Amino acid sequence: PAYSQSKLANLLFAKELAKRLEGTGVTSYSLHPGFVRSNLMRHTMPTMVQPAVDRFARYQWGMIEPWEGTQISLSCTLAPPERLENGAYYAQNNSPAEYKKGGATAETTATLALEEADDMEVAAKLWDLSVKLVGL
């Protein structure tokens, strides 16, 4: 639950930031790069099984290379702001199996992640708690 809660917090925070910065020319998005191959595995399982799991993840689960995972970040960064929805969630793909080589464009992947991610009251509470926790 902690991982999914942290992802929901990212969605809510991006929406609240977009609301607070409305009219300033600054935009906010939450992004999901896809199932990206990284070194995180070395901290979560025994060394002797890592090569097998890595191969399985790449070929069976559609794990992508780091350069491929950067595509959605680059697309959101480089796209004209008027082509994107401020505060929206953009995903590299909806699931690893649907990933297509060549990357995705932010304009075509705006997705509503969860109903909870649209709760602006919770987003404001998260913002206020975050401000308090960091001492601003």
Image: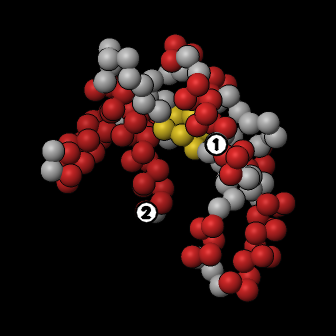
Q: Position of residue 93 (x, y in %)?
A: 69, 40
Residue at 66%, 46% in the rendered image:
69
Disc 1 or 2, which lies upstream in sequence?
2
| Mark identifier at residue 52 | none
Query: 112 or 100: nearer the eye?
Result: 100
**19 w.r.t. 130: above or below:** above
The residue lying furthest to the right in this view is: 59
Say whether residue 19 is left or right of residue 67. Answer: left
Pointer 2: residues within 10 angstroms few (<14), some, or many (20+)? few
| Colour scheme employed for the rendering of this structure | secondary structure
Q: Position of residue 8 (x, y in %)?
A: 43, 47
The kind of residue tagged 1 is Thr
Query: Please, what secondary structure does the residue beneath circle 1 have?
Result: loop
Say whether residue 129 is left or right of residue 15. Answer: left
The kind of residue tagged 2 is Ala
Residue at 43%, 62% in the rendered image:
2
Residue hosting label 1? 70
Query: 12 or 31: nearer the eye?
Result: 31
Residue at 77%, 43% in the rendered image:
98
Say whether residue 91 is left or right of residue 60. Answer: left
Residue hosting label 2? 2
